[in-house]
Image (cartoon, helix red, strand yellow):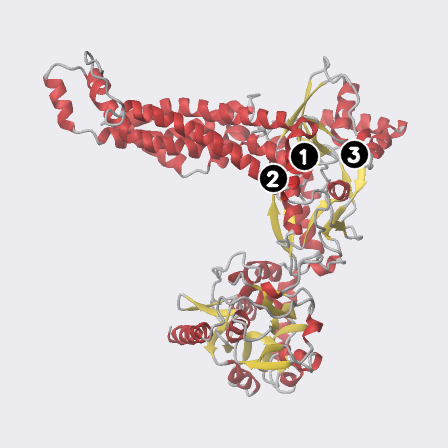
């Protein structure tokens, strides 16, 4: 704790110095920084931490600049933050942590040197270093390194896992560390933690050794390791040539590179990602669609990359344009569609996989699988499949029209699950589902003499819908994987492709050239969102679904809540205890989980309308909260009024109708109104059970326009208008039941 206090005092003193010196908040008028090479000039000052690889790199490659030497990374980033130096050089993984906590700072994309983070030991400890190398090889191979990198260095979960100590250690080793280098090794709640510390704990288990930790100032810790005062140095140690003369180094246990930290407002406007090869994604954030196979592909091909999860490609497109992610994974045909509808993005030449795309079926639909396979073979032999492929994957949008096929027959129904955000496999066009997979499914249904019923749902819900029997077949560019084959059946492949990586083009995302300003841009966005392909009809349909679910859920939820309230207030345990359990269980269950349990588990074997399931789910959820509101309102009514009413001959029903309910309603309605509006907004999750509400429709439109802002803002405005209107109506009711707020009319009095 004393070390923490000293560190905090030093940081505060430095901050106070910079503020008092007039640097804080002052606009930065110095030259814009375009590349690291620019700073090899006398007018630039670069900070480096003493004795590190970054210091050697800067001294060697930037001989013409001014160099300032800092004792710690804290000193360096504060000097950049308050304009004392132009840049600070250090390990990228450590500086990424700094940037995450300082939004006014940024990293330059180009590296200025290689970096190796190693474990150090005295020259005589050759055998010990060999054992450390064996552990490093093991922890890289089994995925532990990738997991730790993701949690600590990409800030996914800065928490030490519960690792056991060796039960019967064969030896005791002294470990030297710094304790001041977040996120590698630092104090939290009085305990050493960080990437280095977890690495050391895992190494202790591997060696069956008891580790004793010593925190020492960095210049001294190197000397301590070199002279054998400590057994191992695990403290984000750079493998510099000078240190190699003094001690032994292990293999690299953290991959990194040296880069520059600068003030964000000094960087030149973004001119592309600079990514031309898949290997460059290591250590960077890469977009992944939730529920897809992209996650496993990314881990196997680029283990150092950090997955960022999204629900659709339109969100990822905006994220890569704004630099929030370095790129995202997408099936190659979808990549072509994205590039046709948005500018400034390209696909890397190398495909990460070579996949077969197929229809998926539940395990109990082996007969349907055989029938579909036979139809696909016939279509491929006749050339029909190739014709469909050329049309939907080509660049002629006018040719992408579904043929007029009869998809109603006497041989039963095929319930097809798909996702309308997967163009060109499946997407909305002129208010109807279209696409490569949709046409093939329609052709097959026509050949089999079966009725095709298509259900649009979230990607993450498609496989569960097959497993639970809600769907008979699924199609939306589904790739065949061994993991999926354990849960579902696949048809023969109908298309061969692969997974690509989409990044910002080398010349960056161009400014819009066809609008000439804000107002024309808004008009263009309005037309694309609402008028093109009559998309306003989709919006109206989604809005109607949202309103229906909200109103009916409020009605049924209020009635059910009143019943639960009576049970909760009952004096008998058989009524009181179940009511308590119901309330706590529902309040502790997220609404999206409740909806999926109802749809896929409780009503899994029933052919029930998804909107009805949503009404049931929201009614149950609303009832749990309404019952507690009512109980509180009823308890707020003075008991003496009840006794007085009974004394003059009122029945229990009359007491409730005339006395309890009017007064309780005044207490309940303000809270009821807020909970009602909250439920209206919560209906935005019903897309998980294949309902096209207002939010789902917004996602569908964005999947076609690849505009993130306007459809979202338009959706937010629509929700606001609905919420305001419904809140106004409830306020009218609130006034009606409150005698203090409604206008009084005295009968028999005539106003002049």
- Crowding around mark 1 (Cα neighbors within 10 Å: few <14, some 14 to 19, many 20+) is many
The answer to the question of whether label 3 and label 2 lie on touching residues, with beta carbons closer than 8 A, is no
Of the 4 image quadrants, the one containing the N terminus is bottom left
Does the rendering let one see residue 253? no
- Residue 745 place in picture, x, y as percent: 23, 17
- Residue 231 place in picture, x, y as percent: 54, 80
Q: Residue at x 32, y 33 (%)?
A: 580
Relative horizontal placement of residue 750, taking residue 733 as reference (left or right): left
Q: Secondary structure at mark 3?
A: loop
Find disc 2 in the rendering and name its residue: 710
Find disc 3 in the rendering and name its residue: 492
Using the image as rendered, state which of residue 599 and residue 640 is in the foreground: 640
Give whichever of discs 3 and 2 has the lower sequence position. 3
- Crowding around mark 3 (Cα neighbors within 10 Å: few <14, some 14 to 19, many 20+) is some
The answer to the question of whether label 1 and label 2 lie on touching residues, with beta carbons closer than 8 A, is yes
**Residue 154, image quadrant:** bottom right
Q: Secondary structure at mark 2?
A: helix
Q: Nearer the viewer, mark 1 or mark 3?
A: 1
Q: Is residue 499 above or below residue 187?
A: above
Does the rendering let one see residue 455? yes
Q: Is residue 61 above or below residue 522?
A: below
**Residue 633, image quadrant:** top left
Of the 4 image quadrants, the one containing the C terminus is top left
Using the image as rendered, state which of residue 83 and residue 382 is in the foreground: 83
Using the image as rendered, state which of residue 353 and residue 425 is in the foreground: 425
Relative horizontal placement of residue 681, taking residue 45 as reference (left or right): left
Q: Is residue 346 above or below residue 118?
A: above
CA–CA distance in space, label 1 to label 3:
37 Å
- Crowding around mark 2 (Cα neighbors within 10 Å: few <14, some 14 to 19, many 20+) is some
Number of numbered labels in the structure image: 3
Find disc 1 in the rendering and name its residue: 528
């Amino acid at each position: 704790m004393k070390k923490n206090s000293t560190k905090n005092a030093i940081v505060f003193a430095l901050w106070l110095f910079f503020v008092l010196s007039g640097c804080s908040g002052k606009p930065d008028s110095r030259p814009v920084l375009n590349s690291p090479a620019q700073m090899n000039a006398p007018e630039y000052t670069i900070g480096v931490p003493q004795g590190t690889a970054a210091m050697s790199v800067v001294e060697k490659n930037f001989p013409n600049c001014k160099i300032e030497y800092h004792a710690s990374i804290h000193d360096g980033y504060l000097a950049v933050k308050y304009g004392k130096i132009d840049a600070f050089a250090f390990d990228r993984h450590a500086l990424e942590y700094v940037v995450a906590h300082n939004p006014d700072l940024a990293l330059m994309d180009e590296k200025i040197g290689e970096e190796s983070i190693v474990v150090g030991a005295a020259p005589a400890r050759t055998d010990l270093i060999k054992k450390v190398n064996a552990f490093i090889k093991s922890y890289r191979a089994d995925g532990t390194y990738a997991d730790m990198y993701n949690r600590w260095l990409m800030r996914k979960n800065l928490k030490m896992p519960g690792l056991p100590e060796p039960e019967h250690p064969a030896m005791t080793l002294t470990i030297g560390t710094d304790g001041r280098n977040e996120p590698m090794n630092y104090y939290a709640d009085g305990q050493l933690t960080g990437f280095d510390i977890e690495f050391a704990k895992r190494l202790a288990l591997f060696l069956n050794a008891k580790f004793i930790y010593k925190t020492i100032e960095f210049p001294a810790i190197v000397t301590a390791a070199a002279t054998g005062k400590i057994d191992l140095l695990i403290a984000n140690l750079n493998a510099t040539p000078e240190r190699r003369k003094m001690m032994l180094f292990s293999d690299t246990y953290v991959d990194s590179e040296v880069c520059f930290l600068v003030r964000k407002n000094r960087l030149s406007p973004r001119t592309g990602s600079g990514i031309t090869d898949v290997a460059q994604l290591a250590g960077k954030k890469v977009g992944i669609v939730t529920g897809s196979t992209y996650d496993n592909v990314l881990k196997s091909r680029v283990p150092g990359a950090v997955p960022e999860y999204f629900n659709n490609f339109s969100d990822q497109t905006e994220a890569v344009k704004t630099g929030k992610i370095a790129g995202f994974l997408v099936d190659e045909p979808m990549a072509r569609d994205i590039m046709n509808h948005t500018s400034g993005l390209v696909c890397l030449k190398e495909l990460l996989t070579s996949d077969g795309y197929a229809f998926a079926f539940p395990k109990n639909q082996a007969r349907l699988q055989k029938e579909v396979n036979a139809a696909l073979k016939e279509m491929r032999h006749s050339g029909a499949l190739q014709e469909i492929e050329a049309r939907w994957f080509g660049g002629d949008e006018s040719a992408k029209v579904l043929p007029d096929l009869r998809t109603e027959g006497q041989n039963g129904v095929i319930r097809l699950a798909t996702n309308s955000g997967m163009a060109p496999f499946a997407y909305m066009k002129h208010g109807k589902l279209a696409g490569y997979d949709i046409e093939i499914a329609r052709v097959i249904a026509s050949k089999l003499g079966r009725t095709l019923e298509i259900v649009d749902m979230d990607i993450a819900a498609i496989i569960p819908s097959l497993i639970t029997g809600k769907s008979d077949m699924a199609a939306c560019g589904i790739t065949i994987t061994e993991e999926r084959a354990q849960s579902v059946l696949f048809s023969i492949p109908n298309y061969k492709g692969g997974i690509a990586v989409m990044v910002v083009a080398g010349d960056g995302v161009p400014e819009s050239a066809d609008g000439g300003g804000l107002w024309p841009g808004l008009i263009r966005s309005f037309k694309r969102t609402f008028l093109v392909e009559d998309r306003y009809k989709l919006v109206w349909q989604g809005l109607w679904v949202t309103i229906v679910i909200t109103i009916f859920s409020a009605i049924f939820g209020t009635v059910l809540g009143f019943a639960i309230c009576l049970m909760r207030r009952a004096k008998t345990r058989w009524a009181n205890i179940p009511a308590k359990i119901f309330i706590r269980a529902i309040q502790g269950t997220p609404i999206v989980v409740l909806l999926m349990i109802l749809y896929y588990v409780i009503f899994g074997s029933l052919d029930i309308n998804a909107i009805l399931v949503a009404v049931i789910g929201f009614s149950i959820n609303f009832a749990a909260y309404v019952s507690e509101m009512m109980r509180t309102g009823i308890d707020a009514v003075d008991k003496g009024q009840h006794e007085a009413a009974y004394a003059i001959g009122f029945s229990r029903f009359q007491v409730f109708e005339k006395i309890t309910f009017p007064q309780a309603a005044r207490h309940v309605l303000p809270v009821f109104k807020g909970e009602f509006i909250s439920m209206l907004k919560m209906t935005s999750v019903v897309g998980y059970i294949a309902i096209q509400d207002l939010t789902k429709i917004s996602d569908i439109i964005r999947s076609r326009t690849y505009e993130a802002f306007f459809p979202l803002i338009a959706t937010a405005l629509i929700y606001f208008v609905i919420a305001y209107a419904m809140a106004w109506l409830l306020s009218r009711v609130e006034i009606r039941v409150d005698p203090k707020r409604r206008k009084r009319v005295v009968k028999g009095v005539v106003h002049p």
